[in-house]
Image: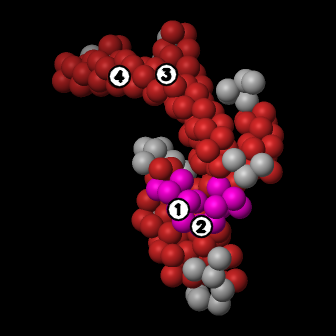
Amino acid sequence: YNPSSFALTVKLSNIFERRNEIGLVKETFQSLIDNLMLKDEFYEKQFQELKLKIDERDEQKLQQQQQASISNDSETIVKQEDLTSDELQMNQEFERIKKCRELISRSITTCFANEMKSVKRINGNKEARSVFSQARKYKRITWHVFYDYAMMEFHANEMKICLRSLELALKYFGKDIEFIIKYLNFLVFIKDL
């Protein structure tokens, strides 16, 4: 068993689900989530260190520009476009790490959403709500788990909880266009717009 494989985790949890072994289903997903969280912490540390270096570099360049403008020495003005190859490489590495962080956070969200759905099929909404509660504690959760939870409650005829979950997601992800479109489409669907 590979604890970082999403496909194997889902397959294994499906086997446990057919046997109604909820503890093993949760343990399987939690193992994958823990593994992804370790990667998340690694990339978060790299991201913060590189961000600090870039901020310091930019601050130095800004100070050089300010000194050059005070002395009116046009030859010493440092342009932002004149980045060295090391600086360009640092910017590229920063973007790569940023994308990795986004991918991992989306992967963790997907794991929580799938665990929530599996647990619901075995034990119902009450147990799935505890998974949702656990997912919300992750600092970089995406809106997808809120939407999946809301749809789970909607299909269980719990409209009040469904709308409350979507409103909570709107509070956190109100600037995410993809979420706004999903939310508005849902409101149109239920004729509540």
Residue 45 x, y percent position in the rendering = 42, 22
Q: Which residue is mark 3?
A: 42
Residue at the left extreme of this rendering? 70
Q: Say if the magenta span includes residue 126.
A: yes
Whether residue 91 is visible here, answered yes or no, is: no
Q: Which residue is mark 2?
A: 125
Gap between marks 2 and 1, in whole Å?
6 Å
Mark closer to the chain start, 4 or 3: 3
SS at circle 4? helix
Mark closer to the chain start, 3 or 1: 3
Residue 136 x, y percent position in the rendering = 46, 53
Residue under the point 59% across and 67% down: 125
Gap between marks 2 and 3, in whole Å?
34 Å
Q: Which residue is mark 1?
A: 129
Q: Is residue 75 left or right of residue 122?
A: left
Q: Say if the magenta span includes residue 169.
A: no
Question: What range is drawn magenta here?
Answer: 119-133
Residue under the point 50% across and 57% down: 130
Residue under the point 57% across and 80% down: 158
Q: Is residue 56 left or right of residue 112?
A: left
Q: Which amino acid type is marked by label 3?
A: Phe
- 193 above or below 99? below
- 178 above or below 111? below
Q: Which residue is mark 4?
A: 52
Mark 3 Cα within 10 Å, few/some/many (few <14, many 20+)? few
Gap between marks 1 and 4, in whole Å?
38 Å
Give whichever of 95, 152 is nearer the camera: 152
Whether residue 75 is visible here, answered yes or no, is: yes
Gap between marks 3 and 1, in whole Å?
29 Å
SS at circle 3? helix
Give whichever of 42, 83 is nearer the camera: 42
